[in-house]
Image (cartoon, rainbow, N blue to C red):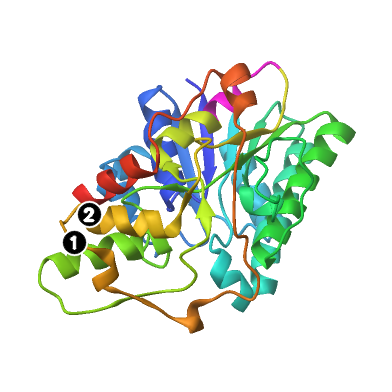
Amino acid sequence: MKKALICGISGQDGAYLANLLLAKGYEVHGTSRDAQISSFSSLDRLGIRARTTLHSMAMNDFRSVLQVMAKVRPDEVYNLAGQSSVGLSFDQPVETLESISVGTLNLLEVIRFIDCPIRLYNAGSSECFGNTNGEPADENVPFRPRSPYAVAKATAFWEIANYRESYNLFACTGILFNHESPLRPERFVTQKIIQAARRIAEGNKEKLHLGNISIARDWGWAPEYVDAMWRILQQDKPEDFVVATGETNTLEEFVAEAFKCHGLDWRDHVVTDPSLLRPSEIMVSRANPAKAKQRLGWTAQNRMRDVVRMMAQV
């Protein structure tokens, strides 16, 4: 039985990944900063909390990471921890950089220190690419991060690459574009839209306040993306992969689809709120996931409209 350690198991991706690995016969361990008081509601919603072993681990504390890794001695480690909101990173840049970059560095150092054949997956982000002038980004497009979150993710990406090349570690980054599910908290704009549309359809008189709805993103279905994470660690050699649908839509189109699910015209219920605009923004995000299709045999089955409908049905 293979053993996996998921750092950040309480989040959307962590929960779906745990579910996938359990189905594949893995012994699954997961971490959060304080496992005694953390909410593992996503694991509860999937009905798998009792089947996972949970540990307290502070990613920015080398000794804490070392203790858990030495105790579990996993075959595979999935680094999904750290501050996960682009918007929040503008308010908490120091915490964002430390939780992502220092946490990743500690994992790499521990793996090097205990000298075990551990395979490490690192959660990268399409935000690292910044503006590509509408050109689809693949693994060879240079990073131009435009948020503290993206800077932190870019730092972690290069840490992974450096340790892979310098110490021959099996360490990879999945550069994931936006991926959503019902497990997203409402501080993410996609879930904010889905829930507001539902409440309005039920008779609530509220208005949905949004920032720039002309931005365009590649939105996929999170349960599919964790399968790509697993496939990345099953390769013969460690490589980085862009994971995306290859289809880009505007946020306005996402909003329209969400309200359409309830037979509503979004224009009657949405207000543009300047206070929600970010200091800097990526206007168009496009992906070229050809390498994932060729090397991993992975292709996204659901596109934005499928994702909206599935989120609205829950």
The residue lying toward the viewer, choosing from 285 and 22, is 285
Q: Answer whether residue 314 is visible to the viewer in this image.
A: no
Residue 241 screen position, x and y as percent = 65, 32
Give the farthest residue toward the right: 166
On whether residue 178 falls in the magenta region, the answer is no
Q: Is residue 268 above or below residue 2?
A: below
Local crowd at mark 1 within 10 Å, few (<14), some, or many (≥20)? some
The residue lying toward the viewer, choosing from 151 and 135, is 135
Q: Is residue 292 above or below residue 50?
A: above
Question: In the rendered image, which quarter is residue 304 located in?
Answer: top left
Kind of residue sitting beneath label 2: Lys
Q: Is residue 275 left or right of residue 255?
A: right
Question: In the rendered image, which quarter is residue 294 located in?
Answer: top right
Residue 128 screen position, x and y as percent = 69, 52
Kind of residue sitting beneath label 1: Leu
| Residue at x 55%, y 45% (from the top left corner) | 177
Give the farthest residue toward the left: 203
Q: Which residues are magenta?
A: 230-236
Residue 259 screen position, x and y as percent = 24, 59
Residue 190 screen position, x and y as percent = 39, 58
On whether residue 231 falls in the magenta region, the answer is yes
Question: In the rendered image, which quarter is residue 236 located in?
Answer: top right
SS of the residue under disc 2? helix
Q: How many angstroms separate mark 1 from mark 2 (CA)?
A: 5 Å
**Residue, disc 1:** 264
| Residue at x 25%, y 42% (from the top left corner) | 47
| Residue at x 57%, y 55% (from the top left corner) | 57
**Residue, disc 2:** 260
| Residue at x 54%, y 39% (from the top left corner) | 5
